[in-house]
Image: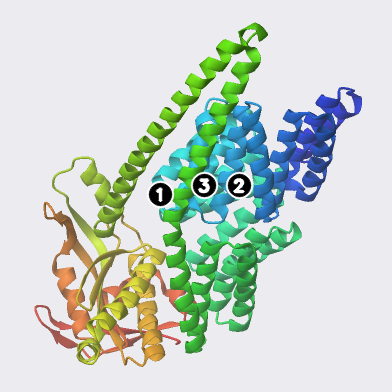
Amino acid sequence: MSHVEQDVHELRKQLDITHDEHQRIDLLNRIAFLYRFVNTPEAIRIAHESLAFAEKLNFESGMIGAYLSLGFGYYMLSDYDTALTYQVKGMYLAEKVGDSVSAARTRMAMAALHWSTGSFDLALTHAFAGIKVLEHEQDEFSGWGWNIMGGIHQSMGDIDQSVVYFDKSLRAFEHIGSIIGQARVMNGLALALEAMGNNEESLEYSRKALEMHRSSGNALGEARSLNDMGLVYFKLGNIAEAEKCHEESLSLRRAVKNRASEITSLLHLGIVYATQREFAKAHTHLLTALEYAEEIGVKPKIYEIHHALSESFERAGQVEKAFEHFKKFHAIKEEVLSNETATRLRTLQTSAATEKSERDAEIERLKNKELAAANAEIHRQMEILDEQASSIEIANAVLEERNMTIVQMHDESERLLLNVLPKAIATRLKQGEKTIADSFDNVTVLFADIVGFTQLSARTTPQELVEMLDVIFSDFDALAEKYGLEKIKTIGDCYMIVGGIPTPRADHAWAICRMALEMRDSVRRLSDATNAQLQIRIGVHTGAVVAGVIGKKKFSYDLWGDTVNTASRMESHGEAGRVHISDAVYGILMQQFSDEARQYRLTFEQREPMQIKGKGMMKTWFLVDDE
């Protein structure tokens, strides 16, 4: 019997012997809440039973508990509209009766829902409001609150802050002995470790989470752990193990009918199949994922799926379909980003409505406490309170608008700083470090130059030229993020990127070469779709460099050393449409990544030794894949 079933068994024993109707409703709500992960349909059935009973008795506390369980239940089934309806009812009733803790718990549930649909601003607004009340409770809800905060920041790319919140969540769950809670935090930490490049530690955390979910009977948790393991195995090049994990995860998610998580498994399986060139299976999975994502309206997933379809169709040689999905990927991603402004406005409106509701509730409580003989005095005092409330509301609105402006200015400054500096370097600058100059013994540098761009500029308008460069370099930036590499700069139509900086990593040469091939394919896809007759020439070299920040007002993070010059020479002595690598890169790939190279059907074509300026005669290679 799982931990949850044991707890439910004890609650049902109490339910059988109690005759207090209010206590029976509370017990039903506790059972429904426990079942939300392990038996969602049963949780919803019990919560509806409790709600009907509570409404009959006009037991408002019981109604709030039932609304909370129903909101969680329908959220688990990906029925977000129904879930939000019950969450709003629960929050309104909790605020009406002055139950700030239940209102905060409902806000955390709403934060989880908005997080799932990609509305991160709304998610953070509700999460901050909820955790402000719950942080001192040290119960299951405070643990979930911190976990949701960590998940939201993780989705926004703020890994360091997410780990801080996950740590608080883990301590809360350990304090109350919640196995399911601890397992969910392990899942979040596993993804954080994977994002930081600690793949083996990530797998270990996922395995621990998997066992804990199994002991609790939480099939969705099992599926989440298997999915996370599949992502790491795929990143490590173990495609067979990745496929196995994602297939098992998909089977579990289909069994519990959780559409949102099923979309994730279909997406990742589709990517795995495309990598193995099983395009029919890949497209079936990805198109099914797209249908489901559009059905429930999760736009972040929709543009991820379009991007995966674009890459899969391009590999399959279906260029028109690839470009069609590539355009949809960019359009929907831009739409999601532009919606953030509207989301902030809705957040302000929601906050104002909540504050007004709280003031009205306080005035009502004051009225009920006064003696009948003091009615006239109360009326006079309430008029004064109304005037003060109006003044406070105006002052709060002005203050909130100023605070929002400050936050937006800070966020914009952070965004601009991270556009020109790696996050780790930006952090060092903000901490007061004056001079940043580091030596790295072993990194891989890539230079890429767009062949034919000068001729293209002569026959296109400046606007068309800039738009095409933006599409090309935006795709390169996305690939850099995918492989965890650091873009150094662009000069005209030249692109420079490095692996192993500022955080050293053992697979820098392999990651750079994988990205180089995808850069070549990206330019080829755009050229075919637009008849622009573009190709890219790429050069790669491995060695030691010095990296640092120069400038006082306009910062620049740059590299210096013979390795940089040699990588540039590899590019200039290469050929259009090919990846030209030095013998140093070839040696690393053959010594450390020969199995991965075979997995991806990569081979090496040796060139005749050539005279390289400043280096003398060099032996070099072309990196060749099964296109």
Q: Is residue 154 visible?
A: no
- Mark 2 or 3: in front is 3
Q: Could you tell me how many numbered marks the image carries?
A: 3
| Residue at image point 54% right, 72% down | 271
> Does dot 1 land on a helix, a strand or a loop?
loop
| Residue at image point 56% right, 11% down | 377
The disc at residue 209 is 2
> Does dot 2 land on a helix, a strand or a loop?
helix
Answer with mark 1 or mark 3, whichever residue precedes in sequence. 3
> Does dot 3 land on a helix, a strand or a loop?
helix
* Residue 620 locus on image (x, y percent): 25, 83
* Residue 611 locus on image (x, y percent): 13, 86
In the image, is residue 591 above or below residue 406?
Answer: below
Answer with mark 1 or mark 2, whichever residue precedes in sequence. 1
Answer with mark 2 or mark 3, whichever residue precedes in sequence. 3
| In the image, farthest residue toward the left | 614
